[in-house]
């Protein structure tokens, strides 16, 4: 079984990451990531450039995909503050390893752009180009739903299980009922990235397994994708893998293979050799 991580970060030009619980190191290179992937048994990974703390991270990701084309693909980004950048959407996938687009919209000021009309050009442009877009949709589920409904041919990914980013244990799942209703839109998928973060318990994080099962039941194995966001996980990379491959009794066989990488590749158009 091939194992593909749906979200990782690499960076090189910062003092320390400014986002959340990520490792407070000046750089985390493709080579350092590959070493950890090899030790954990991870075959490939989807890089999400952390533009919030390294403005050159998109170029760094492209260089990594060029050097290691069988190990990396990218969900890239560009500054949405520059009107001239709108044209970058067209031909975006011509860049090495580039699969789609991703903006987390973590900050309140960034989320306001989802509502003020300034991004209304983006959704139809990405839809026309066949570019999947990933966002921290759990922070704005109603708006995420609205975009998905208006643009049925735009493939959209909800980051980090779509759960409450600021909660753990039961508090992480306070919006679960609303989240699973999005499964009725065939253009919406969930990246089950960062799951261990949502539990204060030790491995195998039993108190979040039922919630993950509900997400799986709603979206199915071809629209729920395993991943880590490894640089902020509270457990080892290998435990992030075995949490899904060994500890979830409802995830077996072909369904497991889909969740652990095959479904992601089909969803974003990554022609990875299985």
Image: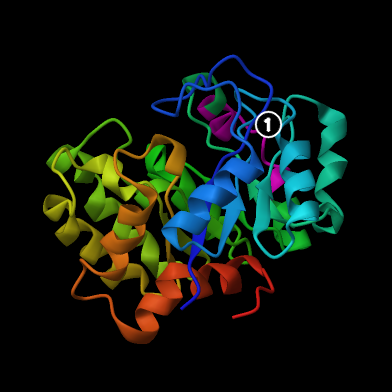
- The answer to which of 88 and 160 lies nearer the viewer is 160
Q: Furthest residue to the top?
A: 15
Q: Quadrant of residue 243?
A: bottom left
Quarter of the image with the C terminus in it: bottom right
Q: Residues within 10 Å of mark 1 (few under 14, many from 20)?
A: few
Q: Residue at x 50, y 74 (%)?
A: 2
Residue bearing mark 1: 118
Where residue 182 appears, as percent x and y from the top left, is 38, 60
Q: Residue at x 18, y 74 (%)?
A: 249
Q: Can residue 134 be seen by looking at this rendering? A: no
Q: Residue at x 84, y 53 (%)?
A: 95
Secondary structure beneath label 1? loop
Q: Is residue 221 magenta?
A: no
Q: Residue at x 67, y 68 (%)?
A: 270
Where residue 29 appears, as percent x and y from the top left, is 64, 37
- The answer to which of 116 and 209 lies nearer the viewer is 209
Residues shaded magenta: 111-123
Instruction: Identify the coloring.
Output: rainbow
Q: Is residue 119 magenta?
A: yes
């Amino acid at each position: 079984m091939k194992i593909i991580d749906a979200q990782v970060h690499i960076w090189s030009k910062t003092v320390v990451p400014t986002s959340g619980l990520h490792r407070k190191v000046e750089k985390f290179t493709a080579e350092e990531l590959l070493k950890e992937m090899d030790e954990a048994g991870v075959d490939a990974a989807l890089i999400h450039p952390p533009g919030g703390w390294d403005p050159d991270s998109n170029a760094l990701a492209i260089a990594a995909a060029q050097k290691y084309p069988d190990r990396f693909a990218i969900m890239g980004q560009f500054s949405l503050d520059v009107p001239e950048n709108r044209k970058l959407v067209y031909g975006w996938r011509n860049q090495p390893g580039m699969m789609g687009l991703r903006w987390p919209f973590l900050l309140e000021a960034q989320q306001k752009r989802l509502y003020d009309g300034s991004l209304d050009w983006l959704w139809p442009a990405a839809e026309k180009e066949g570019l999947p877009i990933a966002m921290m949709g759990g922070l704005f589920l109603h708006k995420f739903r609205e975009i998905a409904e208006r643009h049925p041919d735009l493939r959209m990914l909800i980051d980090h299980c779509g759960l409450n980013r600021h909660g753990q244990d039961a508090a992480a799942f306070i919006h679960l009922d609303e989240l699973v209703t999005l499964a009725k839109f065939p253009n919406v998928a969930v990246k089950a990235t960062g799951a261990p973060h949502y539990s204060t318990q030790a491995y195998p994080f039993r108190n979040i397994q039922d919630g993950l099962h509900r997400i799986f039941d709603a979206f199915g194995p071809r629209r729920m994708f395993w991943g880590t966001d490894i640089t902020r996980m509270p457990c080892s990379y290998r435990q992030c893998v075995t949490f899904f491959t060994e500890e979830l009794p409802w995830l077996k066989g072909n369904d497991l293979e889909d969740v652990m990488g095959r479904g992601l590749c089909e969803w974003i158009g990554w022609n990875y050799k299985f």
